[in-house]
Image (cartoon, rainbow, N blue to C red):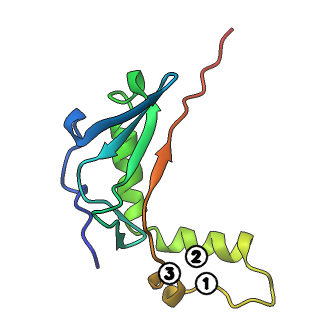
Amino acid sequence: MSINPLGSLKIMNSTFIPQDTLDDFTTYQISHPITIFNQPIADNEPATLTIRASELAPRQPEIQAYLNWLVDCRAPLIAYYNAQLTHPSQPRADDDWYNSLEIDTANQTIIAMRYCG
C-alpha cells in the first residue's frame, strides 16, 4: 500500500508553481510528489494543473480531494475498464492489470462552466 504524499499535506498556493499562461489559463507545476493509481509520478516528469488563475484558490479543496482519490481508485478504474473499454473476447482487467499500470506524467485541466442568465 502506498501513501499519498499529499494525503496529509494541505495544499496551499505554494504547492503550485506557475509555468505558462495562455489566455485566461495558467499551467502550474505541482511541487509535491504525486501518486496516481498507486504509482508515483517520476520526479523528472512533474504533474501539472491547468486552470484559470482566479479559480485556483477557491478550488483547492476540490483539487486536494481529486488527487487523493487518484492515489488508489482501483475498483472504479477496473469496473470502468471492464464495462466500457474491454471487448468480450479480451481478458478482463483485474488486480494484476491494475498493478501493472505505468504512469509517466499527469496533467489536469479544469474548466469551470458558468451559466449566464
Give the residue type that dot 3 points to.
Tyr
Q: Disc 1 to disc 3, how far (Cα)?
A: 7 Å
Q: Residue at x 54, y 86 (%)?
A: 97
Give residue 39's position: percent from left, percent from top: 37, 73
Labels 2 and 3: the sequence-earlier one: 2
| Residue found at the very far top of the displayed protein | 117
Q: Which residue is drawn at 44% across and 57% down?
A: 106
In what quadrant of the picture does the N terminus appear?
bottom left
Between residue 22 and residue 24, name the one nearer to us.
22
Give the residue type that dot 1 points to.
Ala
Give the residue type that dot 2 points to.
Ile
Residue 76 drawn above or below residue 21:
below
Labels 1 and 3: the sequence-earlier one: 1
Task: Determine whether label 1 and label 3 are within 8 Å by CB.
Answer: yes
Disc number lying in front (2 or 3):
3
Q: Mark 3 points at which residue?
A: 98
Disc assigned to residue 78: 2
Task: Determine whether label 2 and label 3 are within 8 Å by CB.
Answer: yes
Q: Name the residue under label 1.
A: 93
Task: Determine whether label 2 and label 1 are within 8 Å by CB.
Answer: yes
Query: Would you call the spot at circle 2 few (<14 residues within 10 Å), some (14-19), or many (20 or more)?
Result: some
Q: Disc 2 to disc 1, how far (Cα)?
A: 6 Å
